[in-house]
Amino acid sequence: MSDARIIDGKAIAAQVRAEVGGHVANLKRDHGFVPGLAVVLVGEDPASKVYVKNKALQTVEVGMKSVEHKLPAETSEAALLELVGALNRDATIHGILVQMPLPKHIDSLKVIEAIDPMKDVDGFHAVNVGRLSIGERCLVPCTPTGSLILAKTVMPSLKGLDAVVIGRSNIVGKPMAQLLIKEDCTVTIAHSRTRDLEAVCRRADLLVAAVGRPEFVKGSWIKPGAIVIDVGINRITGADGKGKLVGDVDFAEAVKVAGSITPVPGGVGPMTIACLLKNTLEAAQMQHGLEVKSFGQA
Ligand code: GUN
């Protein structure tokens, strides 16, 4: 069998951003405002700093207003909650993202719940989680949204597929399952305690790996021809002693079996920020009482 089709997340993310950029230009022309995104970073986590910098660059690139709040690691929970409150009240800010993880002395859930659900562009607030679970319009977490868009570039209708999501996190696994239910898939959420995980995965027409373990899913676990979406981003030391990024799927093995597969890097990763910008656009449209223009198939 020939190798799997490689799903080009970088190119598809660029399309999503271009589409967002077009809508932003229209808002500016027709309604005289641009969407604003505030990103709050507490502390000095190096990976978080890179994400935040990339977010700011891409926000400006699509024509939106970008505001960054970089706070020291010792910032109190009360001070952070106060900042979130001020951003909730700021009419020029339509999206608020507090970068996770937060320092241990801060209760992340309390911070998430303090964000106005209309501005919760991460889709982490219980109001958005609840609305997603009843299939209502809401702000949906960015990584699952991006993963779904990628799967639908291969197969526009996922109706009736057996989908297996490995991972049950609030950020990826659970919302991914909700989105796939909405697409009429038969969904299984598997995780580290699942019995005979390999056999469960082998039933999947669509396999989403979000476990956070490098190259965990082997080629022999994949149904021939399946769509494989690899959400993992793991930094490991390669054979040459240098650091490299790998997914949760053993790509070299999987590419021989799958029908299509996302690479790491260049698969789901670039989609996350693109979908954050899409959420910010939709949040701004909602807050101005405008029709939310859906695009990007998800
Ligand atoms: N840290 C890593 N990914 C994310 C994300 O999508 N949102 C937030 N808020 N923090 C993160």
Image (tube, rainbow, N blue to C red):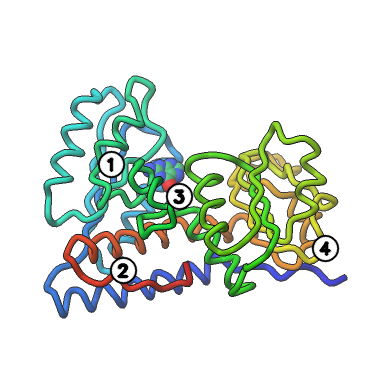
Q: CA distance from mark 1 to mark 3?
A: 27 Å
Q: Which residue is mark 3?
A: 133
Q: Residue at x 63, y 60 (%)?
A: 185
- In the displayed structure, does residue 3 sit left or right of residue 71? right
Dot 4: element: loop
Mark 2 or mark 4, earlier in chain: 2
Q: Position of residue 98 (x, y in %)?
A: 32, 41
Say which mark, if any, is on residue 159.
Answer: none
Q: Position of residue 248 (x, y in %)?
A: 67, 46
Q: Residue at x 43, y 37 (%)?
A: 46
Q: Residue at x 23, y 66 (%)?
A: 285
Q: Position of residue 100 (x, y in %)?
A: 40, 37
Mark 1 or mark 2, earlier in chain: 1
Mark 4 or mark 1, earlier in chain: 1
Q: Nearer the viewer, mark 3 or mark 4?
A: 3
Q: Given contact means CB atoms under 8 Å apart, are the residues at marks 3 and 4 in contact?
A: no
Quarter of the picture containing the N terminus is bottom right
Say which mark, if any, is on residue 40.
Answer: 1
Q: Nearer the viewer, mark 1 or mark 3?
A: 3
Q: Quadrant of ligand 1?
A: top left
Q: Residue furthest top?
A: 105
